[in-house]
Image: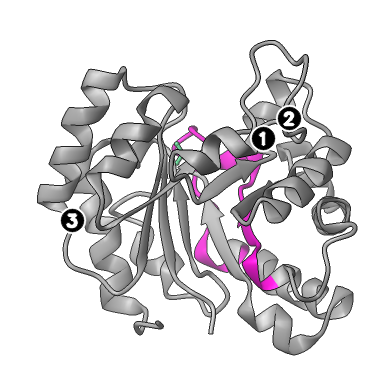
Amino acid sequence: MRRIILAGNWKMNQTPSQAQVLLEELKNSLPATKHTVAVFPPYLALTQAVAAGEPFLVGAQNCHFEDKGAFTGEISLPMLSEIGVKAVIVGHSERRQYFGETDETVNKKTLAVLRAGLIPVICIGETLPQRESGAYAEVLKGQLCAALSGVSAQQVPYVVIAYEPVWAIGTGVTASAQQAEEVCAMLREQLGLLYDADRALQVSILYGGSMNAGNAASLLEMENIDGGLIGGASLKPAEFAAIVQAANDVKEARV
Ligand code: PGA
């Protein structure tokens, strides 16, 4: 069965010494849980996050799709893997918007992350005009299919999808639980068409976009929402702890 994942995307926040403090505060604040708690700190704090140990599954916020070579400034999957990183966020909307990430590079990175034996957390999401025009379902299906091109049926259960409506990221505006569930259910149906219904049930689909202590329970209650990719609130230990607690309260533990 798919796992429930509460993932903190720290974005470009926390120097290494600040990260050390935050990791310790998180460890002290988080409730015990059967669910997966993941942190995605900046590259320079990854080693510390790995060293922090339980309960964290540690992921990077980006990677290059080549193993090595003349790509100044980039970080490869063998580098991440060697230090104990287990997951990578792929195609976050901020990377699509500010750093030229396209459906094609998202696909290349997804395939590379899977080849390296890590978990790709693939972000997809529509903009406000796409939501308002009603075109969002087609946009999202297109992003999903493009990201998964060449991913085999054996590989797909190792993929995590994060539905992150661009209009909800960092804005304080959250998709309603019904809006988020409608999309996550549609994505699972699409996975069923691309693969099969059994495999679709094994893929964790997260919601991201201003998830916080106040709205987490109502989102996590939804059948097709298997956790959250959490930005701002993941930097506040009490708030992140409350989100993990909300998952404990509303989601049955799946091992
Ligand atoms: P937010 O960010 O929770 O601050 O909206 C979520 C994300 O971008 O992953």
Left or right, residue 106 beside residue 222:
right
What is the x, y in percent for residue 223? 53, 80
Pick the residue in front: 69 or 14: 69
- Considering every residue shown, the one lying at the far left of the view is 28
Asked whether mark 1 and ligand 1 are closer than 8 Å, the reply comes as yes
Please name the amino acid that badge 1 sits on. Answer: Ser
The first of marks 2 and 3 along the sequence is 3
**For the residues marked 1 and 2, what is the alpha-carbon distance in whole angstroms?**
5 Å
Q: Which residues are magenta?
A: 157-179
Q: Are marks 2 and 3 in contact (CB under 8 Å)?
A: no
Q: Which residue is mark 3?
A: 30
Q: Which residue is mark 2?
A: 96
Pick the residue in front: 148 or 65: 65
Q: Secondary structure at mark 1?
A: helix
Q: Are marks 1 and 2 in contact (CB under 8 Å)?
A: yes
Magenta stretch holds residue 174: yes
Is the C terminus in the top left, top right, bottom left or bottom right quadrant?
bottom left
The first of marks 3 and 1 along the sequence is 3
Q: Which residue is mark 1?
A: 93
Label 2 environment density (alpha carbons within 10 Å; few <14, some 14–19, many ≥20): some
Label 1 environment density (alpha carbons within 10 Å; few <14, some 14–19, many ≥20): many
Please name the amino acid that badge 2 sits on. Answer: Arg
Judge whether 83 appears above or below 5 on screen: above
